[in-house]
Amino acid sequence: MTGLPPKPDGRGGRIGALRFLRLLRRDILSAQSPRLYRAKMAEFRTPFFRSYVINDPGLIRTVLQERPGDFPKSPHLAGALGPLLGNGLFLSEGADWARQARMVAPLLEIEPRRALPHLHWAGQAALARLEARADRAAPVALEGFARHLTADVMFRLMFSRPVAGEEARQLLAVFDAYQASAPLVSLAAVFPGLRGRWPAVKPATRAAARELRKMVARLVARHRAAWVKGQPPGDLVGRFLAATDPETGQPMEKVELVDQAVTLLLAGHETSAAALSWVLYLLALHPAEQAAIAEEAEAALSAGPVDHAVLSRLERARAVAREGLRLYPPLPMLLRQTAQPEQFRGRAIPQGAQIVLSPWHLQRHEAHWPDPDAFRPGRWRDPAQAAARRDAWMPFGAGPRACPGAGLAMAELVLLTAMICRDWVLRPAGPAPRPMARLTLRGQPPLMAVVTPRRRSDGT
Ligand code: HEM
């Protein structure tokens, strides 16, 4: 067992608004006070802006589950992501969101079972890419590897075809350009005087979004054309094309189809890639756990086609996936806003204040988790940690806006981790990465591993 896996330092003591904002724009994690690993709530206030991190399971339940309508998603999120996602399921609010959720969420919920063969094929294509590397001794950039793999999964599920070669490179480059230049918090968020005068995103970010939306619009149009000639394809986009609102009978409009398709492509591949790359990095740091997963995978995956029964036998891989999501939640902080004045823990919170729900801090909170910063997959079988697992683990959010792709994402994470460890050995390479939160949680410098073939127990 190596030391503790990487964790950012967090800011020092009290800091001013400008420094807080600068840290926030670079990386929302290192802007936070280390006190949050012990506290139930923390306030940051300037004359123009109040932000509250809520770290208490009861209050989190109030915000996300009991009264979600009083805590809409923060408009800063729409500012940062709107040019890319439009008014899709992730960003919409109120009656508009409810209509979209009626149409889109049920299509996603049935996905985990339908998806298993596609996950398996995408996994095999990724293993072949590892095999085909010109230089096996050169370290692999885990995030790039995982992003290609999870984008391929989403393409297969959405458009019934893989994404590879130049198309994959272009798609990931545009998402990367967007992630690199879109701050989650704009200057106008903290200084209201700048609102309307300061662009939420830079012109280059907007251009990257336009390019990506055009790519997706072309794919959707091709699908629509195929449908006009025959049956709607059975994939996700085909089902979107055929879906009607159960209350009004209306189908989705053209621009909304693109909004939903880009939303799924981004929400479905960036998050899963962040989760997979951190899980693989954790396993690179813990060779004994990695070997145990390889053994479990060899036994389970050699039994025949990958179905639900095979997936349920991958217990160790599931525990590692959950522990990876605990230590490195791909969306480490969720942003909301108060629609009216509130009283939280005896403090008056004004209307329009930012409320931050932080899976990152909750999932490493000293009051809930023994050895919170340690990688301990065994805690997922420990009866003494059942309350923590129930109250202090929320990588997929909670309540009506919780992730509708959670079942699919877990199946993906467990199966792909098992397939990779069955065939390959990972060892950490390069300097230790610092977790850094932009749209999703990445490593800085990037997560790297040397990946060499694993010798099987039968000698192959
Ligand atoms: C490990 C992988 C994933 C993680 C950690 C994750 C996490 C989350 C979280 C935390 C939210 C709630 C955000 C909030 O409340 O502000 C969310 C929402 C969402 N996720 Fe995921 N997600 C993952 C994979 C996926 C996949 C595979 C899909 C699609 C196939 C997906 C589609 C969505 C959508 C559409 C929403 C918005 C739901 C709404 O607002 O009604 N996610 N996700």
Image (tube, helix red, strand yellow):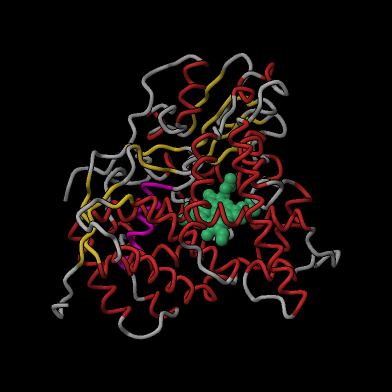
Vertically, is 191 above or below 327?
A: above
Bounds of the magenta span?
A: 315-329
Secondary structure mostly seen in the magenta stretch: helix
Residue with the most extreme left position = 459
Left or right? Give the position of 313 relative to 84.
Answer: left
Q: Does residue 96 show up magenta in the picture? A: no
Q: Nearer the viewer, residue 343 or 178?
A: 178
The percent position of residue 392, horizontal first and vertical second, equals: 44, 48
Residue with the most extreme right position = 248
Q: Does any portion of residue 398 appear in the rendered image?
A: no
Q: Nearer the viewer, residue 85 or 49?
A: 85
The percent position of residue 306, horizontal first and vertical second, equals: 41, 79
| Residue at 80 percent of width and 67 percent of height | 246
Vertically, is 196 above or below 72?
A: above
Q: Nearer the viewer, residue 400 or 173?
A: 173
Quarter of the C terminus within the rendering: bottom left
Q: Does residue 317 show up magenta in the picture? A: yes
| Residue at 40 percent of width and 56 percent of height | 146
Q: Nearer the viewer, residue 137 or 370?
A: 137
| Residue at 66 percent of width and 41 percent of height | 82
